[in-house]
Amino acid sequence: MIGATRRWFQRNRKGLAIGAGVIGAGYLAGQYVLSKISEARERMSSDRIARENLRRRFEQNQTDCTYTVLALLPTAAENIIDALPVEELTKELQQKRAERLARLNAGEATGSDLSSVSPSLPDDDRRSLSSFQSEGYVHASQVGDSSLNSDGQPRPKRNKTQLWNEVKITSVTRSFTMVYTLSLLTIFTHIQLNLLGRRNYLSSVISLATPPANASTISLEDHDDELTQTLGDDFETNRRYLAFSWWLLHRGWKDLMGRVQTAVEEVFGPLNPREDISLAKLSELTLQIRKKVEGSTEEERRSQKWLSCLLPPAEEEEHVLRESGVEGVADPTSSETASKLRHLLDETADLIDSPSFSLVLTLLNNEGFSTLIDQRCAADAFKAPTSAPETALQSFDSIATVVPLAANSERKTKLANLLAVMTRQAHVIGNGAHPPNEYLVAMDQNVRELEAFSAVVYSSNFDLELLGAKNKELPTRETDLVDTEPASSSFSQVVVEKEVEADLKKEEIIEPQSSSALPEESVLLEGPPFTEPEALADSAFEEAWGKATDDGSISPTEEEIQPIP
């Protein structure tokens, strides 16, 4: 039997060998396929976790931007209100009225005589002054102090007409300057925090991707100083960079106020505070002011320079650091910290000068002026209902201020009453201590391009910084990276065109802008093309840009491009 079995194996040894080979090859192939499937699952899981981590970081960053604006806004508001003291002017008007009444009372003994001369004070003036007083900015106990200015020196004597003209110019200038300052502070804060957020994210990714070389051994040596030194250097760079918001809060708004005041004097100068003004007329006047400040054409708005309002010139940078309390607190700045700070400032300047910045700033201004004119002034001064939209979208002939429909266009009020509302709204715009600030809420919720702009800032230059950290042969200093590819490269491909995807869902398209919104062109914010030499750099941009494209909150919009006359 054993011999028969041996003979059978000898006769079929070739077939058995082939069968064993096939089975073995099949087993190996199956194991290979299973391992690849397992690797793909792990990679997909890690990518999903990384994407969710980046999404959470980005969303938290935008929330931090809002709270930072609320924290900084009162400083700018206080400086602007002190520079444009409408309340002091109204107190001086009240004092003149009180002095005139006192002279009348002293010169006439009988009530009949008083009644015969009291009409010499026009009813319009009494109502106008009472409108300011009813807003809570003029108190009888403060009337006697209005003869001195904020420096404690006597004020020059001015007649009633001059005072009313100053009240008119100052109140409008102050409220408009506050709107522009809030818009600039909002977008500038988003640039700063998203640039730093990108750096922090990359630092965490690199630290996780590059474990210590001797991780398998236990060392009793203390290497904490190296980590502390690295983190301390980044902290010092971030602290100095954030200190540059001081410029807008204390100096930049002055340049802005000068532009606005010049435009207000030209537009509102001929108006008499006693005359009636309609909502349509107010919209037209606001339009004229915005054209003078921002530019009347798309090309003028893009060429408008806002950099001087947001960042100091190079010779003033040390002064800003000293005034903000940063310079001198820590050790002298190292060369590495200085180079990192210079790269951040240069990249910020490039972003401010980009067309995307101009577009987003215009949209923020649209929301600010819409809230001021279309909602607050319409409701408080013109007593117009604001529960439902009653305005119509206008082409750029109207640089996007309010265009009231027939239901509200004929509503009129005294210009003095309107000035009282604007005086009060300046305090509301600058409100940061008691959130929510309705102007900031409107900008955050309605200007979705701001979040797209932030996503581009957050995800730009990922490949350069990651490769600079991973490859030792590449320059590691950020100033060297600038030489390789300028910081503004992430906006070299900003596409200003109307691009509508066929599968874009209707609910992902933002609702039309309010009547005070510019008919802007649709902008698709794109970053630079990214190479894939490293696995870490391969998914970095995709993860960041996924936030900007996956959810509908920041998808590009489809809007009509209006011709500019």
Image (spheres, rainbow, N blue to C red):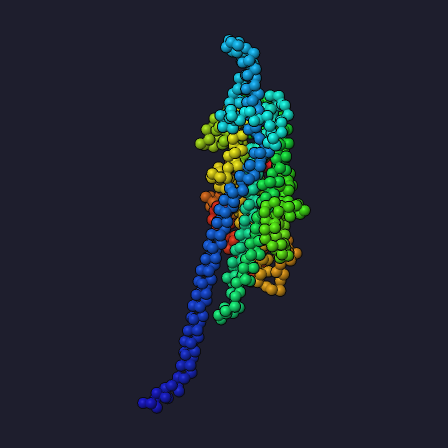
**Quarter residue 21 falls in:** bottom left
Q: Position of residue 22 (x, y in %)?
A: 42, 76
Q: Residue furthest right?
A: 315
Q: Position of residue 451 (x, y in %)?
A: 52, 46
Of residue 330 and residue 176, the one placed in the foreground of this image is 330
Q: Position of residue 524 (x, y in %)?
A: 56, 47
Q: Is 341 displayed left or right of 509 in the figure?
A: right
How far across and how far down the image is residue 97, in percent? Answer: 55, 19
Residue furthest bottom in the image: 3
Q: Residue at x 53, y 39 (%)?
A: 74
**Quadrant (top left, top right, bottom left, bottom right) of the N terminus:** bottom left
56 w.r.t. 263: above or below: below
Residue at the image position 57 percent from the left and 53 percent from the top: 236
Front one among 312 and 322 = 322
**Rendered view: 368 above or below 50:** above
Q: Quadrant of the C terminus?
A: top right
Q: Is residue 33 left or right of residue 230?
A: left
Residue at 49% x, 71% y: name it: 217
Question: Visible in this render: residue 515?
Answer: no
Q: Give the residue displayed 52% in from the left and 66% down from the top.
A: 222
Up the image or down, 323 lies above or below 266; here it is below
